[in-house]
Amino acid sequence: MEAKHYTFAIELRCGVGIRDAAATADIRVPRIYRAPKGFYVYLLANPETDCVFYVGKGKGNRYAFHERECRAGTITNYCKHDAIQEILDKGLKPKAYCLCSDMEEQDAYALETAVINRVGLSNLTNLSSSAPDWLNTIEVTRRRAIRKLETVIPFPWWVKMAPRTEEDIKIYWMVLNGLRQIADRGTYPSGALGPLRTRPVYAF
């Protein structure tokens, strides 16, 4: 990692916008409007603050993949998804900047990792590359349960919508309590998956 890139990353860590950070570090960090040459390291920024929220590397139109993923409703990283969705909800689009291009893949990976480490994961929506897959899976599961809970019809309303048997009511509370446990812990309690998968029509 060159000294200028280090200075640039430290400025970003302090909450400085990308253009101002680039000026301080005396490096050129242009906006991306079409795919850069070769492998490249890119930054996604909030268009209102110009502050970075994601650092990535790739080739071709990789920089545009995250917005397309968000618009399609595909979620692999909730923090990144929420950051992009918040921008889209305002009628705006994330800004994409190119930190370095025409690189070998291993060099792009090294620079991406170095920038993420200097900026700090707490200041980004990146998932830690060293985090085990199960940790992200738990968080994804927990977030899905939270969102599902937001759509649950309250029991007093649900029970009046149609005739309910004792078995219906039992399943309602089993699923609801299961979702609450998943939202709290990110893991599936015993018995929660059966009714959730086989009888989803009740209130969920």
Image (cartoon, rainbow, N blue to C red):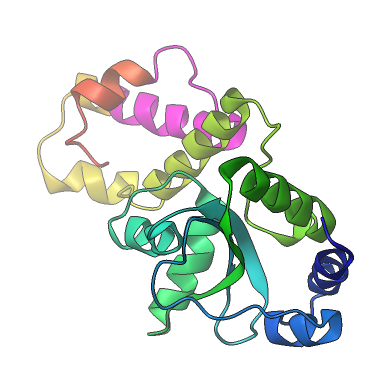
Q: Residue at x 44, y 33 (%)?
A: 179
Q: Quadrant of residue 192?
A: top left
**Could you say where residue 154 lies in the image, as x and y percent from the top left?**
34, 49
- Quarter the C terminus occupies: top left
For the N terminus, the image quarter is: bottom right
The main secondary structure of the magenta stretch is: helix
Magenta-drawn segment: 170-192
Can residue 49 be seen here? The reply is yes
Q: Which of 189 and 12 is in front in this view?
A: 12
Q: Which residue is drawn at 57% across and 44% down?
A: 105
Q: Would residue 155 appear left or right of 29 to someone viewing this image?
A: left
Percent across and percent down for residue 197 are 25, 24
Q: Is residue 59 above or below residue 174?
A: below
Which residue sits at x=53%, y=80%? 31
For residue 10, side relative to residue 193 (left or right): right
Q: Compared with residue 41, is residue 164 higher up or lower down, i.e. above or below?
A: above
